[in-house]
Amino acid sequence: MTDSTPQAPTADFRCGYIAIVGRPNVGKSTLMNELIGAKVSITSRKAQTTRHRITGIMTVPDTQFVYVDTPGFQTRHSNALNKTLNRTVTTTLTAADVILFVIEAGTFGPADQQVLDLLPASVPCILVINKADQVKDKAELMPFAQKIAALRNFAAIVPVSAKLRFQLENLQSETRKHLPENPPMFGEDEITDRSEKFLAAEIIREKLFRFVGDELPYTSTVLIEKFEVEGDLRRVFAAILVERDTHKSMVIGQKGARLKDISTQSRLDMARLFGGPVYLEIWVKVKSGWADNEAGLRAYGYE
C-alpha cells in the first residue's frame, strides 16, 4: 500500500510466500491479520467470506513473511464461484514456500481431510491448531494433535489462538526456518500488495455480511465505482450488488437503518486502515445472473 522500496537485506535474510489454507471458518483470515498486525483480510462468521487470494506482508530485520490468505476449499457445491475459489487455493499451493494448514482445535472432519489431501508433499507444511484457548480440557489437546500428526509428516505443530495472539511468535519462528534465503520482495512498510480500492470493497463486503448475516446469499458482492484521493481524503463510491429485489430490501433495512450501519462501520474501518478521513457513498443494486458463469466472475474481480 506504500511506494517504499525494499530494504537492504541483512546476512541470512529470508523471504518467501506462506500459504494459509484450511476449510472455511477455521480462522485463516484472523490469523493472517494478527500475524501482520493489520486488517487486510476480512473476517466473518459466515462461511465463504474470503473469495480472493489476499497477500499480507510482515517485515522484521531478518525476514519478510509474505502470507497468502486463501478462500476455504469448497467441497459441497460445484458451481462456478466455488470452482473459481478452489482453483485459487490450488494455484497458491504450487507457488508457496511454506504451507500453514489451519484446523480448529478438537475438530477434524472430512472437509479438513480433503484440504490436507491437496497439499503437495514437496512443500514444508506446518500444522496450525487454531482456537486452542477454546478447548476446555487442555489435556485433550496433545492426543488430538498426535492423531492429526500421524496423517502427514508436518514440519512443525503449533497450537495457537489467533484472536488472543497466543503462540504467534512461535509460529513465525517455525515458519522462518523453512523460508528460502532471499532479499525482500516488498518495501519494509508495505502490508499488502492489494490496492486501497480493493481493500475498500472488501471492508464493505465484510460489514455487509456482518449486518445482514445468513439472510443474504454469499454471491452478493461489492463494486467500487469510483475511488478518488485528495491529499489525505479518500472519496469512495460503491455499489452492493445483489441478486433480487428482496435482497436489496434486506440490505437497506427499515428506513435505511441497516445500510447506514454498513456505511458507518465501513467508513470507520477504512479511515483506520488508510490513515485519513473517508467520504463514503453506497448504493444497492440488483444485478441478476452475474455469478452464473466464470466470465461474470472475472468481470467482478475474482481470480
Image (cartoon, helix red, strand yellow):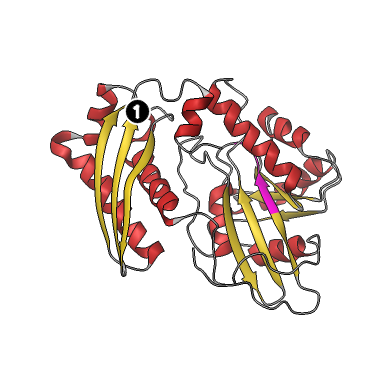
Residue occupying image coordinates x 40% and y 20%: 289
Q: Residues within 10 Å of mark 1 (few under 14, many from 20)?
A: few
- Residue drawn at x 57%, y 57% is 56
- Give the quadrant of residue 11: bottom right
Helix, strand or loop for the magenta stretch, by majority? strand
27 over 182 or under it: above or below = above
How far from the left and from the top, in percent, is residue 31?
58, 54
Q: How many marks?
A: 1
Residue 167 in the figure: left or right of residue 176: left
Q: Residue furthest left?
A: 255
- Please tell me in which quadrant of the rendered image residue 211 appears: top left
28 to 1, vertically: above or below: above
Q: Secondary structure at mark 1?
A: helix
Residue pointed to by mark 1: 215
Q: Work out whether 14 lies above or below 212.
A: below
Q: Residue 188 lies in magenta, yes or no?
A: no
Can residue 165 be seen from the camera position used here? no
Q: Quadrant location of residue 217?
A: top left
Is 157 on the left-hand or right-hand side of 245?
right
Drawn side of residue 283 relative to residue 127, left or right: left
Quadrant into which the C terminus falls: top right
Picture coordinates of residue 9, whole percent (x, y): 72, 76
Up/down of 286 relative to 227, above or below: above
Magenta range: 18-23
Position in image of residue 241 (x %, y %): 33, 32
Disc 1 marks a residue whose amino acid type is Glu
Nearer to me, 271 or 152: 271
The x and y percentages for residue 244 are: 30, 22
Q: Residue at x 27, y 31 (%)?
A: 285
Confirm whether residue 169 shows in the render.
Answer: yes
From the viewer's perspective, tell me whether residue 209 is left or right of residue 260: right
